[in-house]
């Protein structure tokens, strides 16, 4: 059983203070393998390995959750298949493949808009 | 405290939605007449502010196309006209269908509107896939009006109102009109708090609440209040340019949506909800929302992974024959009407404003509006009286 | 009515005691819980497999928490318990629910609906509060209580209210590094506040003891501060907090996380959707659903109990939950419910009145610093969801003529994001009122719309 590092030197934001003798759960975040502990929320898994949960759509930077009780809706992420996951209220499960940016399959740019963004007319 | 002096202007407009504010603006800008507009509550807050925001000519009754073309010309320069951004996006209006029979209807419409100055393009399922690629396999064909689009209804009415005010119109909010009387050759509107406004010409444009005024002038109109069922999603990556709808005779299938620049998808369609005109309240029925979600997934499967964050409704006036009431009174000189747009007034509102301003100022308009005459209800009533 | 259909929303102290009262009276309620486990927020349960004791988790409230959890466990076979279920809408006599993972929906017919939806933290925006690493005080507590984590390696707690002290002390005890505790309220409560606080002397003493333990632990404690900004970068998040102290000097504290909060705000979305009347409460400067002393709202059949109606805290919530349940049974003419209600109404209402006296003391001692909203610089983000600034909100008043908060929302987008105004509505109202130069109650409140929380569009129609 791997015991993840307690301290934020591992690049995380949250600090584990207790309850570290739990079974490991293996998941991936943005393609990178991550080991969390059974009973962790996805938010805790994200923030013990990194400093961000998502990026604001409106240009004011990264977000890392806010209320942890399912009220602020600021911690929604995706799995690779595009399913929505609210990180603070979702328990980690072995094999989860999580993304902190929307997968292309979620709402793909239409060829017409892609052309317009390249400065072209769709043909 | 009531003010018993009567404020006088050339034109009195009762109703501060898009029809009223656009008319006020053009009366000032194009014709230089003095205008007073009385709005019961806040400018643009009812149907004008709660509708879907479609700016489309495609799919309208043929007798509305000329008016819609006129409106589209205004939309094309609306930001410049008002000095504000109404978020008008001219990336087209696309309607798709689920059956070959409906595809034939779309094709007929393409032929019907072409001589009226509207050029549409048909798309096969394959062509839809190549250009958009978002539709389910149930979609068999589509028709694009490339120069139609959509805009922001929350902003439009108030922006037209402010522009009218800057142009010298007297705009009064919180001014509910209790009754309007004819005094000699003029109209006098009395507000509930005792103010009086008079003018030789009057435009009644109070949306779903207009029947009362029409009735008082001897021109009853059957008018039903219905609530659009609207919803908006979380912001998504910007992907889709045109506003898109399902063309179908089946009411529950008729969903439509558009993506705004910030990324949210606004949608509407399907069954209407309860609209209580007297209480000024309209509601979204939860069952309608769930049905809409089902139909949206059927139409564009990617909706399954999107979140709905808010629903709303509004109060729209329906005339029963799907034709608006627009033009001069059939009985009273100087009286005009613009109401009953059956949930599709947003797109043509700047055209309505230009036409009504023209009509009021000069007695004529270059745009055909005879089909919308209020007199048709009187004829119908007479016919009915004769046969019973 | 011999078998009334009763639905309870929430399994915090109010919901549990409401369910318990119903079961005692011989009714089998449906109990809706958005969470995976019962307990609500203040008595939030740690996940299965965690080992900390109730004493560690809940301190002085351990016995109450234990009793609540055990009592609920005992109730489970006698209620129709639906966890991971969100009540997303309510219409006349029907509660609309959706399951969080399956997307299955239901329309539950009820004769009585007892809403115990609880509260969230009440937030006053601080410039920079939209950065990664800024959390509510409740979030800081949940991270510790439910996940055994601290929100950062060096934490500053800022705001006001009893929770500020409680969470900071809990962090200290658990071994986290607490850099500072910055209270916007003055050190000495006013006489009026003290009078209120003395309704519950044990709680008052407990609060003082917490303060002492924080000082002993070396935490920098400051009162009467004015928050100036939370420093940081868009990528890295929070790096520090800057305040103006009581003497007017600027003081900066380095940190990588901030816990922010000014006591609590009631979750009132279901009240709004149920078309309940609201009234403005000047003491706390917020709109609350009108309820009588038994929790009856203005909508027949709909009752409110707990922090979702009046922030009376956990003890008050337990009493209010029981009372609302019994009142509901009384109102539908349920025989056993009527006799329980008759026997207990006086004592329960008296308990609640005492708690309310304390609540008023709290509101005075730890006031909502509403003037901070008007003082926000134009570039401060007010609506975190939509990144709408104070300046954009003021523009909706000065240039676009808004005199009322829903109009300001229509023009500025404040409150249009995913959280539907939970964290920005109060400050937005203060900003609009200040800009329009009208008292805050005249700008109204943001009207709630369904869904109560975002609804995944995979939600299925029900039978």
Image (cartoon, coloured by chain):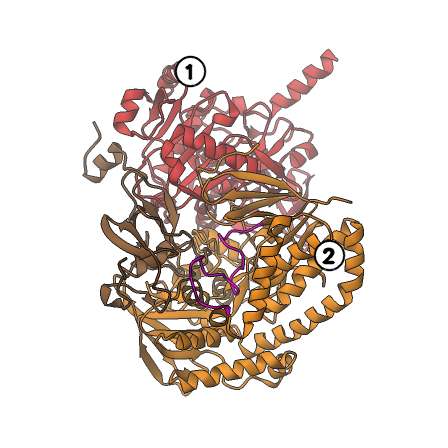
Chain colours: A brown, B red, C orange
- Quarter placement of the N terminus of chain B: bottom right
Which label number is shown at residue B105?
1
**Cα gap from disc 1 to disc 2, whole angstroms:** 61 Å
Q: Secondary structure at mark 2?
A: helix
Vertical position of residue C269 compared to residue B350: above or below: below
Which label number is shown at residue C326?
2
Circle 2 packing at 10 Å, graded few (<14), some (14-19), many (20+), is: many
Could you tell me residue C300's position as x and y percent? 71, 50
Q: Is residue A33 visible?
A: yes
Query: In which quarter of the view is residue A67 placed?
Result: bottom left
Q: Chain of mark 2?
A: C
Q: Is residue C97 left or right of residue B80?
A: right
Q: Is residue C323 left or right of residue A114?
A: right
Q: Residue at x 51, y 84 (%)?
A: C209
Could you tell me residue C409's position as x and y percent? 47, 54
Query: In which quarter of the view is residue C201 placed?
Result: bottom right
Report the front residue among C196 and B9: C196
Report the front residue among B203 and C85: C85
Q: Residue at x 44, y 34 (%)?
A: B347
Vertical position of residue C284 compared to residue C304: above or below: below
Q: Chain of mark 1?
A: B
Could you tell me if the residues under marks 1 and 2 are in contact, i.e. CB atoms within 8 Å? Answer: no
Q: Is residue A55 left or right of residue C207?
A: left
Vertical position of residue B219 compared to residue C354: above or below: above
Could you tell me residue B234's position as x and y percent? 40, 46
- Quarter placement of the C terminus of chain B: top right
Q: Kindly report the secondary structure that dominates the magenta region of the rendered protein.
A: loop
Q: Secondary structure at mark 1?
A: helix
> Is residue B264 inside the magenta stretch?
no
Q: Which region of the structure is painted magenta?
A: C32-54
């Amino acid at each position: 059983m791997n015991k993840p590092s307690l301290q934020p030197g591992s690049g995380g934001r949250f600090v584990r203070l207790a309850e570290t003798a739990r079974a490991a759960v293996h998941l991936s975040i943005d393609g990178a393998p991550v080991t969390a502990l059974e009973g962790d929320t996805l938010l805790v898994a994200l923030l013990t390995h990194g400093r961000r949960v998502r990026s604001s759509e409106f240009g004011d930077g990264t977000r890392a959750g806010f209320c942890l009780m399912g009220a602020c809706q600021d911690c929604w992420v995706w799995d690779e298949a595009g399913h929505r996951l609210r990180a603070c209220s979702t328990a980690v499960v072995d094999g989860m493949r999580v993304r902190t940016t929307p997968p292309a399959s979620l709402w793909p740019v239409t060829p017409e808009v892609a052309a317009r963004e390249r400065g072209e007319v769709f043909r | 405290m009531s003010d018993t002096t009567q404020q006088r202007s050339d034109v009195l407009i009762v109703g501060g939605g898009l029809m009223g504010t656009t008319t006020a603006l053009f009366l000032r800008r194009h014709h230089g007449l003095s205008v007073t507009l009385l709005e019961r509550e806040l400018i643009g807050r009812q149907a004008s502010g709660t509708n879907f925001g479609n700016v489309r000519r495609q799919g309208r009754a043929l007798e509305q196309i000329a008016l819609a073309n006129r409106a589209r010309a205004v939309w094309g320069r609306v930001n410049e006209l008002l000095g504000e951004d109404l978020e008008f996006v001219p990336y087209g209006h696309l309607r798709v269908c689920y059956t070959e029979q409906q595809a034939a209807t779309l094709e007929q419409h393409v032929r019907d509107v072409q001589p009226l100055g509207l050029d549409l393009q048909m798309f096969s399922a394959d062509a839809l896939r190549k250009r958009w690629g978002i539709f389910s396999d149930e979609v068999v064909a589509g028709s694009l009006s490339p120069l139609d689009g959509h805009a922001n209804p929350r902003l439009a009415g108030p922006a037209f109102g402010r522009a009218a005010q800057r142009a010298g119109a007297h705009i009064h909010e919180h001014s509910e009109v209790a009754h309007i009387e004819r005094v000699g050759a003029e109209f006098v509107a009395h507000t509930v708090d005792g103010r009086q406004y008079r003018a030789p010409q009057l435009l009644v444009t109070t949306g779903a609440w207009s029947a009362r005024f029409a009735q008082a002038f001897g021109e009853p109109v059957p008018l039903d209040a219905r609530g659009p069922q609207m919803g908006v999603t979380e912001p998504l990556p910007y992907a889709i340019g045109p506003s898109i709808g399902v063309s179908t005779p089946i009411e529950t299938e008729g969903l439509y949506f558009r993506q705004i620049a910030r990324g949210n998808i606004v949608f509407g369609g399907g069954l209407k909800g309860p609209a209580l005109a007297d209480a000024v309240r309209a509601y979204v029925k939860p069952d309608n929302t769930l049905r809409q979600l089902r139909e949206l997934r059927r139409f564009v499967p990617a909706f399954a992974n999107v979140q709905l964050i808010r629903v709303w409704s509004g109060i729209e006036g329906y005339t029963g024959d799907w034709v608006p009431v627009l033009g001069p009174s059939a009985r009273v000189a100087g009286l005009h009407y613009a109401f009953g747009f059956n949930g599709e007034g947003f797109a043509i509102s700047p055209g309505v404003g230009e036409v009504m301003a023209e009509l009021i100022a000069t007695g004529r308009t270059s745009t055909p509006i005879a089909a919308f005459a209020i007199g048709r209800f009187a004829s119908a009533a007479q016919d009915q009286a004769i046969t019973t | 009515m011999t078998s009334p259909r009763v639905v309870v929303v929430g399994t915090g102290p109010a919901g549990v005691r409401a369910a318990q009262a119903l079961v005692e009276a011989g009714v089998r309620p449906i109990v809706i819980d958005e969470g995976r486990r019962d307990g609500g927020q203040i008595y939030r349960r740690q996940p299965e497999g965690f080992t900390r004791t109730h004493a560690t988790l809940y301190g002085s409230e351990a016995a109450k928490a234990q009793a609540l959890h055990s009592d609920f466990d005992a109730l489970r076979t006698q209620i129709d318990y639906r966890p991971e279920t969100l009540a997303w809408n309510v219409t006349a006599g029907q509660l609309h629910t959706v399951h969080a993972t399956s997307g299955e929906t239901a329309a539950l017919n009820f004769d009585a609906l007892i809403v115990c939806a609880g509260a969230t933290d009440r937030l006053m925006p601080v410039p920079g509060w939209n950065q990664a690493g800024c959390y509510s005080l409740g979030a800081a507590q949940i991270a510790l209580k439910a996940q055994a984590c601290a929100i950062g390696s060096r934490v500053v707690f800022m705001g006001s209210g009893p929770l500020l002290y409680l969470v900071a002390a809990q962090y200290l005890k658990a071994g986290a590094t607490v850099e500072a505790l910055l209270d916007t309220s003055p050190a000495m409560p006013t006489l009026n506040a003290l009078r209120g606080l003395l309704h519950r002397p044990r709680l008052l003493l407990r609060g003082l003891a917490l303060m002492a333990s924080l000082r002993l632990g070396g935490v920098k404690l400051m009162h009467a501060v004015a928050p100036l900004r939370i420093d940081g970068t868009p990528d890295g998040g929070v790096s520090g907090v800057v305040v103006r102290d009581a003497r007017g000097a600027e003081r900066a504290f380095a940190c990588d996380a901030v816990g922010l909060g000014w006591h609590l705000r009631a979750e009132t979305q279901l009240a709004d959707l149920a078309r309940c009347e609201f009234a403005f409460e000047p003491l706390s400067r917020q709109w609350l659903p009108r309820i009588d002393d038994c929790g009856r709202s203005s909508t027949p059949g709909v009752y409110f109990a707990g922090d979702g109606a009046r922030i009376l805290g956990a003890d008050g919530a337990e009493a209010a939950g029981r009372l609302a349940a019994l009142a509901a049974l009384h109102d539908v003419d349920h025989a056993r419910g009527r006799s329980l209600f008759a026997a207990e109404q006086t004592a329960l209402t008296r308990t609640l009145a005492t708690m309310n006296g304390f609540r008023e003391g709290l509101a005075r001692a730890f006031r909502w610093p509403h003037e901070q909203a008007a003082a926000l610089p134009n570039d401060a983000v007010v609506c975190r969801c939509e990144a709408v600034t104070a300046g954009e909100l003021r523009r909706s008043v000065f240039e676009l003529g808004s005199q009322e908060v829903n109009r300001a929302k229509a023009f500025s987008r404040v409150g249009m994001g995913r959280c539907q105004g939970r964290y920005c509505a109060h400050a937005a109202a203060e900003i609009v009122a200040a800009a329009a130069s009208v008292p805050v109650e005249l700008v109204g409140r943001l009207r709630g719309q369904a869904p109560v929380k975002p609804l995944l569009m995979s939600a299925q129609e029900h039978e």
